[in-house]
Image (cartoon, grey):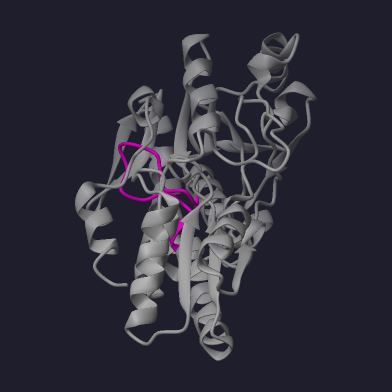
Amino acid sequence: MIKKIGLITGGGDSPGINAAIRAIVVKATQEGYEVLGIRCGWRGLIEDDLVKLELKDVEGIINTGGTIIGTSRTNPFKIEGGEKAILRTIKKHGIDAIIAIGGDDTLRVTHKLNSIGVPAVGVPQTIDNDLCGTDYCIGFDSAVCIVTDAIDRLQTTAASHGRIIVVEVMGRDAGWLTLIPGIAGAANIILVPEDTYDYQNIVDRIEERMRRGKNSAIIAVAEGSTPNEVKTQISETYDVDAFGHIRLGGIAELLAEELEKRTKLEIRSMNLGHLQRGGNPSPMDRYYSTRLGLKAVELIKEKKFDMMASVQGQEISATPLEAATCEVKKLSTELIEISKIFG
């Protein structure tokens, strides 16, 4: 019998997480379950840092960004004694099941927990929107709004000064967060990891704009996108996190420098960075976060473990965690071609 649920938020934060936490606590309380918030991601289970979450704790948080229980990129299976520590904490607090809100790394850990006997389900949360088995991930719409607004603002200053501005967007191996705001914000060139390109191709497109009397341009580039001349994704430090990922960043600066040499035009770069994760969630994120949170509790109640709550069309469904995290959800060729129509 389920009596106590552990709730964790892992990986990068995004707007909408608190809306999901609220829904989970409200639904779980209605079902007679106690909810323990696990602080700072999987690290909270290792360090036995938990807090009871009640209805009063989630009042007024649906419209706030971040996560009230904190997050981290801790990988418990890469820490010596980590697995034993989390099992010890789970047993100590009598946790019957875990709900994990996060992206591919967080949900891979969730899947592995099931394999060692810890019942757990997942909720998709990543501004990259790159989890398989779901049309939508918590945080994506809010981030799209932020990036679109940034591109809108850059359009006016670029036009005023006759400049080309290269704006770097998060996304790592998928271009959802670059392509959709790029189209919405009328970026002139959109560069994503799913498509190949080279410096000369970009130069040709810039020069074509100049021949049409345009003296400015916006280039939206995903952080994990690289020209053919560069053999690896760009990083300023090449530091690796607990899940083996290099901290990306610097492609916009690299492109700006190289394109300025080749075109002799004034080119600037901007990395939107963590601005994309911050602020209050959009109404759409609040809506889907609420529904996904409710679904996660339903999965626990029905003992459908090792599953991820998911959005499929207009319906809220469930996808096996293994299927959701086995590969990156990529942009379609059709979407990429659409992005090239407007220059």
Of the pair 254 and 150, the residue shown nearer to us = 254
Instruction: Tally the marks.
Output: 0
Magenta residues (range): 127-141
Of the pair 147 and 301, the residue shown nearer to us = 147
Residue 280 seen in render? yes
Residue 39 seen in render? no
Identity of the residue drawn at 53% across and 17% down: 113
Of the pair 93 and 147, the residue shown nearer to us = 147
Tell me if 21 is positioned left or right of 194 in this view. right
Does the magenta run of residues contain 139? yes
Position above or below: 84 against 267: above
Tell me residue 161's x, y (percent).
59, 87
Tell me if 89 is positioned left or right of 342 in this view. right
Position above or below: 130 against 63: above
Identity of the residue drawn at 60% across and 36% down: 7
Identity of the residue drawn at 65% across and 21% down: 94
Q: Quadrant of residue 38?
A: top right
Tell me residue 129's x, y (percent).
42, 48
Give the farthest residue toward the left.
334
Tell me residue 49's x, y (percent).
78, 32
Question: What secondary structure is the stretch in magenta mostly built from?
Answer: loop
Q: Quadrant of residue 271?
A: bottom right
Identity of the residue drawn at 35% across and 43% down: 194
Position above or below: 156 against 274: below
Tell me residue 103's x, y (percent).
50, 38
Which quadrant does the C terminus fall into?
A: bottom left
Give the farthest residue toward the bottom.
160
Does the magenta run of residues contain 20? no
